[in-house]
Amino acid sequence: MKNIFKAMVIALLAIGTMAYSAVNAKAKELNKGQSVQIFSAPNADGAITTKTIDEAFEKSGLAIGGNNNMNSPFKLRFNNVHYNVYNLGMFSNADFVVKLIKKYPKFGSLTPLTMSIWSDDKKKTMNISTLSLTGMSKAVGIPENDPDLVAYAAMVKTALKAAMPKGEFQKTNFPIVDPKASFAQEFTFDVSATDDKAIEELKGNIEAAFEGEMEPIGFLLPGYVNLKTDVFDAAEFNDYDIYVTYSICKFDVIYPVSKDTPAAGAWAPCSMYIYHKKGEDKVHVGYLGVDSWIKSLAITDKESIKMLYEAQGMINKILEGMK
């Protein structure tokens, strides 16, 4: 019995030495296998705001690429809001982005990472949803024990604790998504690997068609990052001559989904990448499909599901039309 007790103590101490244990030693097992995590804190005095959350994330090493108040457009468009506070935010760490894309080019579909921030107006709490380590791993097909992915996920947990020191992870009952399932929507465009001008022209045509056709059908593009010039060059990472990401959102989608599933912001705005690796004869375009939302969050509302699939169909139609 003593040996068993001793082994348990050693195991707990080992966990305590890990970076993310300072946030919540139980978090790793609390919702094991679930892709989305929710961190909540009491906020009856209103001290926690989206601004204080932004500041805490920035100090923790996560640059905020935007934190959008969704209630303003919701009031104008739908004449109603579901929560006193509902924001969709984007954040990233340049060092980890470089390290992960070096190994896994499709990590652009999680660059930036996203979160929803909302108030529970009955419980007087503030809540933040993000992807868990498991969710990040499954979404892009990266081993869950990849040291850079583990460290990135730990940084997110540290930022959550810094933003809401009295907070804790909530027990959730989201489904366990099959780790072999791929919800990625991927497109490739043929190019000559040696024709730099043609490659750049194709990128420009994709962006022009994408931007020109998305906005008229109700999509917003709240974020655009040229990783090649803004991140890779500073890190002297020269494998790509093109790598950009778009953040994509649609009011008609997020409004109905957020009513019953406010944590959906862990997936939204979704990130779409466009990249060309030097020496390849393909330009790659991709993003995470809406099944990642539906299956990982157990969305059952028929109207929400309909809007999600319609939005995905619109995006895919534009990209297919470019071929």
Image (cartoon, rainbow, N blue to C red):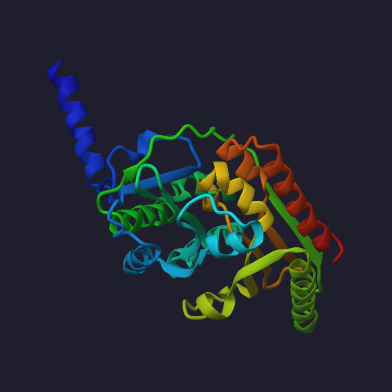
Residue 265 visible from this viewpoint: yes
Q: Is residue 196 left or right of residue 162?
A: right
Q: Nearer the viewer, residue 199 or 182?
A: 182
Q: Residue lying furthest left in this view? A: 2
Residue 66 spot, x, y in % from top left: 50, 69
Q: Residue at x 56, y 41 (%)?
A: 260
Give the side of residue 244 with respect to residue 117, left or right. right
- Which residue is pictured at 63% across the width and 72% down the height? 243
**Residue 238, image x and y in percent?**
57, 76
Residue 70 appears in the figure: no
Residue 194 sits in which quadrant?
Answer: bottom right
For the C terminus, the image quarter is bottom right
Q: Quadrant of the N terminus?
A: top left
Residue positioned 34% across, 68% down in the render: 55
55 vs 178: above or below: below
Q: Is residue 51 above or below residue 303?
A: below
Give left or right: position of 72 versus 305.
left
Q: Residue furthest bottom?
A: 197
Whether 146 is drawn above or below 322: the answer is: above
Residue found at the far front of this picture: 79
- Picture coordinates of residue 10, whole percent (x, y): 19, 33
Q: How many marks?
A: 0
Q: Position of residue 250 (x, y in %)?
A: 67, 59
Instruction: Name the residue: 36% across, 39% down.
Output: 28
